[in-house]
Every structure is written in structure tokens, then in C-alpha cells.
Image (cartoon, helix red, strand yellow):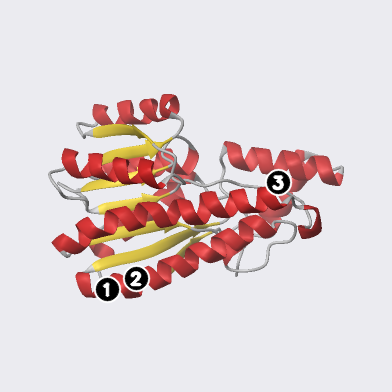
Amino acid sequence: MRLANMTGIVTGPAKGMGQAISETLAREGADLVLAGRDTAAIDEVAANIRAMGRKAEVVKTDVTDAKQVEAMVRRAVQLFDGRIDILVNVAGVTGPIETPVWEIEPEDFEMVLRANVFGTFLPIKYTLPHMIKRKSGKIVNIGGTSGLRGYRYRAAYSASKWAVRGITRTVALDVGDYNVNVNAVCPGIVQTPRMDKLCEEKAKKRGWTMEQVYQEYVDDMALKRVTEPQDVANAVLFLASEESRQLTGHEVVVDGGWDV
């Protein structure tokens, strides 16, 4: 197994990409702390992981609350005898959909940045001292292709994903001397309930069918197929393993060729 005897934290592990990432890391040998707000959904993921013979601890956490994140990391340190090998930041929100910037409410814009940017910063802040102490670690942030180009009518979300890239590259420079790799995976549209919601909202505002919105996304992709959660999980696994030992401060794009 590629992650045998390793430990990690995954934020936002309950559904879609988060579930696929958590179960893939566990399948490859990692014991995990699963951190998020929807503990009922996370419990199901934890049960799947325990059935693989791995440890899975569910810690109710709002990733935008510094005290909760600090307590969650402290619990992981206790559970894993001071060792945290992997941190994967999946937790995030979608924010306003198909909304021009002048119609976005200030509090909605702020909410997206707080969840997607501050909610990525806090787990990094509290996990890094333990990685630095051991001079070893892998941090993987979930960005997005909307952080690689402009994304019409999605200013808040796009801004947040550009910021995740900035955090990724800067932290990689900060901790390179300590043998800690920091990278991001940038998915495009992924086949999850969140994509269904996105297509539904776009269709409603445009007067289209959901199928027309979906097909528009497919037509924009070189491979003409929508990314599956497992495609993203496979990229995270690579960045969490020693196979990526010489890769830091970069993005792995998993989007079927949407951003080509």
C-alpha cells in the first residue's frame, strides 16, 4: 500500500470528492481524522474506512473557527502519537451561482472567502508545526479550475480558488526547508450532488434544461466527459504519497481538458 502506516486529516470528508478522497487514502493504508460539520454523513464514511481495517476518528469541526480547528488537530496528534503525515483540505462552499458581481451580496462574497480561504488556512496553520517538528509532511489543497481562469458570474468562488493557489505556493516556499510538500488539486466540474445543484441553478436562471447546461460543460472539455470523484481522489493520492516527493507549490489539474 502506498500510504502504509501513515496518518492524516481530511476536512470536508462527508460526500462526493471528500468521501472518495478519504476512502482512497484509507484503502492505501492511512489512518484518518475526518473533520467536518455534518457528522452523520461523516460517520458513514468512517464506517467504510474501519471496515478496511483502518482507524477513522470523526471530529465535528467548523473549519472557519480557529478554536475548533486547533482542537481537531490536537485530537489528531493525540490519536496518532504526535504524527500527522497528510493534510487534505477539501471543505468548501459553492457560493452564488450565475450571478454577476454587482448582484452578489457582500455577506455572500465574504462567506465564500471565509469558507474556502480561511477554512484552508486554519488547518494548515495548526497542522504544520507538527510536520515541521518531524521534518516530513504532505499538504494537499482542493482548488479548482476557476482559480486558473476567469469564471463568468462566479466572482466569489473564482476569487477564493485563486487564493487557494496563492496559499499553496507561498506555504510551499515557507516549509520547503522542513521537507513538507504543499500542492493543490484543481478539479473542473465533478459528478457530485454539488454539480447537480449548479446545473439546476444555471438552468433556472437561463431558462434552459439541466441537460442543456450539463452538455455545455461536456462540450467545453477536450475529453468530452465529466470528472468523477475518484479521478480527483487518484490525484490526491499521488500528491500524498512519496511518488510526488519532488513536487511542491504546484497544481495538478483534473478537468478533462476544460482549461486547455
Q: Position of residue 163 (x, y in %)?
A: 53, 65
**Callout 3: helix, strand or loop?**
helix
**Callout 2: helix, strand or loop?**
helix
| Residue neighbourhood size for the residue with mark 2, other residues' Cα within 10 Å, grouped as few (<14), some (14–19), many (≥20) | many
| Residue neighbourhood size for the residue with mark 3, other residues' Cα within 10 Å, grouped as few (<14), some (14–19), many (≥20) | some
How far apart in space, not on screen, are marks 1 and 2 (Cα)? 6 Å
Query: In the rendered image, which quarter contains the C terminus?
Result: bottom right
Name the residue at 65% across, 38% down.
196
Q: Is residue 30 visible?
A: no
The residue closer to the viewer here, 210 or 6, is 6
Q: Position of residue 53 (x, y in %)?
A: 19, 31
In the rendered structure, the answer to whether residue 30 lies left or right of residue 42 reads left
Sequence-first disc among 2 and 3:
2
142 in relation to 25, above or below: below
How far apart in space, not on screen, are marks 2 and 3 (Cα)? 36 Å
Mark 1 vs mark 3: in front: 1
Q: Which residue is mark 2?
A: 172
| Residue neighbourhood size for the residue with mark 1, other residues' Cα within 10 Å, grouped as few (<14), some (14–19), many (≥20) | some
Task: Indicate the amino acid at tag 3.
Answer: Tyr
Name the residue at 52% across, 47% down.
92
204 in relation to 238, above or below: above
Q: Residue furthest front?
A: 67
**Callout 1: helix, strand or loop?**
helix
Q: Position of residue 124 (x, y in %)?
A: 35, 57
Q: Which residue is mark 3?
A: 214
Task: Confirm or deny contact between disc 1 and disc 3 (CB under 8 A).
Answer: no
In the rendered structure, the answer to whether residue 258 lies left or right of residue 29 reads right
In the rendered structure, the answer to whether residue 152 lies left or right of residue 89 reads right
Task: Indicate the amino acid at tag 2.
Answer: Ala
Task: Confirm or deny contact between disc 1 and disc 2 (CB under 8 A).
Answer: yes
Q: Which residue is mark 1?
A: 176
